[in-house]
Amino acid sequence: MAGIYIHIPFCKKACHYCNFHFSTSLKSIDAVVQSIKTEISKQSSYLKEPVTTIYFGGGTPSILNTSLLESILAKLESHFSLATEEITLECNPDDITFEKLAEWNRLGINRLSIGVQSFHEHHLTWMNRSHNAEQSINSIKWAQKAGFENLTIDLIFGFAGLSKTELKENLRVVQKYAIPHLSVYGMTIEPKTALGHQTKTGQYLPLPEAEANAQMLMIMEELDRQGYEQYEISNYAMPKKRALHNSNYWQGATYLGLGPGAHSFNGTSRHWNIANNQKYIKLIQQGQPVYEVEQLSTIDRYNEYVMIRLRTIEGINLDQIENLFPAYFNYFIQNIRPFIGKHVQKTESSYRLTQKGKFITDLITSAVFKVNRESD
Ligand code: SF4
């Protein structure tokens, strides 16, 4: 199993908290798509296994007209062995129309990831989202009406201005529409964003950590009550509705990232595509590589393994970590030990976060991280 991620680096508006690679200048959409197709031809030997998942992320992939999306899929079809079980398209509510939904269906897109973030108008305005609360609701209703059973929405919590009542209301809408999968993220303040600037200049006062944690607890309890499984810290699924693409990534599967700012991983190295649309187009035109390669040391792979796996419901598998990283096995056992009980549950075969542990994931991860590169 292998995955392909395609980064579409365009958005209509810059959300105030966003740190992803995107441009609000839409002039070069055609040129970037053309370059992505050239990149597909060049990277056709990167994946040795059949491709089971394709993920259009961004940015805002729903900004593309159907013919551009179709041309990318056709190019993938001709250069890779496709055995796709899941093709996901990230979309913003304001791009969703019945006409587009029918076209996406026709292209074989079978999963939509909708960037709802909140069902409250004043939150969306504050975030500088391109959609409104009515579009948040309509996007879900229309997608379901068009037959997209495999649906996920993004929600954000942990920002000043989100009251407990409003959070409860957001979760009630989730229940009302029986949305099968959710990604729920805590607001993070990135320095180079509008929100980062507002925070630095005192215009925005972040929500105190205790209140953000109280919101996270409310989300976990309410979604558990509704029947969701929190199969990764930020991801909740109804039975059999886990995201395949992301699950494969958490299992360490190989994936190829295409487009400006995309990453690839083949088990031993990581490719980082240049996160600049014009430079990306130019390098492709000149026939130059668009990426830098980072060879991963055993320590890098160990750190990544513990960081990613600790976030999942399965946790860290004892046999696996011993087989994959024998040199660091004792180090791991020693450093996870202080957390066992209250924050980490030890079973016969794994170490998994308890509910309390989920609030200090970063602390536990850093405790088991290996930093001494010289001993690798
Ligand atoms: S739509 Fe998504 S990628 Fe674009 S600016 Fe907003 S959060 Fe970032």
Image (cartoon, helix red, strand yellow):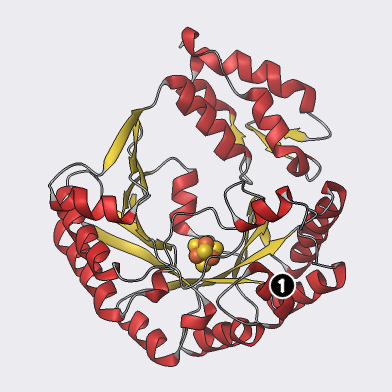
Task: Identify the secondary structure beneath mark 1.
Answer: helix
Picture residue at 43% right of the left edge, 67% below the top: 24
- Pick whichever, 322 or 355, lies toward us: 355
Mark 1 surroundings within 10 Å by alpha-carbon count, few (fewer than 14), some (14 through 19), many (20 or more): many
Task: Give the farthest residue toward the front.
Answer: 201
Q: Is residue 60 visible?
A: yes
Q: Quadrant of residue 310?
A: top right
Q: Quadrant of residue 170?
A: bottom right
Farthest top residue in view? 375
When the figure is inspected, residue 93 is found, relative to residue 250, above or below; the finding is below
Q: Residue at x 56, y 58 (%)?
A: 18
Q: Position of residue 235 (x, y in %)?
A: 62, 57
Which one is in front, 304 or 160? 160
Name above or below for residue 129 compared with residue 256. Answer: below
Q: For this rendering, which residue is in front, 15 or 90?
A: 15
- Left or right of 97? Residue 169 is right
Q: Position of residue 271 (x, y in %)?
A: 33, 39
Assign the C terminus to one quadrant of the image.
top left
* Residue holding disc 1: 123
Q: Position of residue 126 (x, y in %)?
A: 69, 70
Q: Could you tell me which residue is drawn at 71 percent across and 67 percent down?
A: 227
**Residue type marked 1:** His
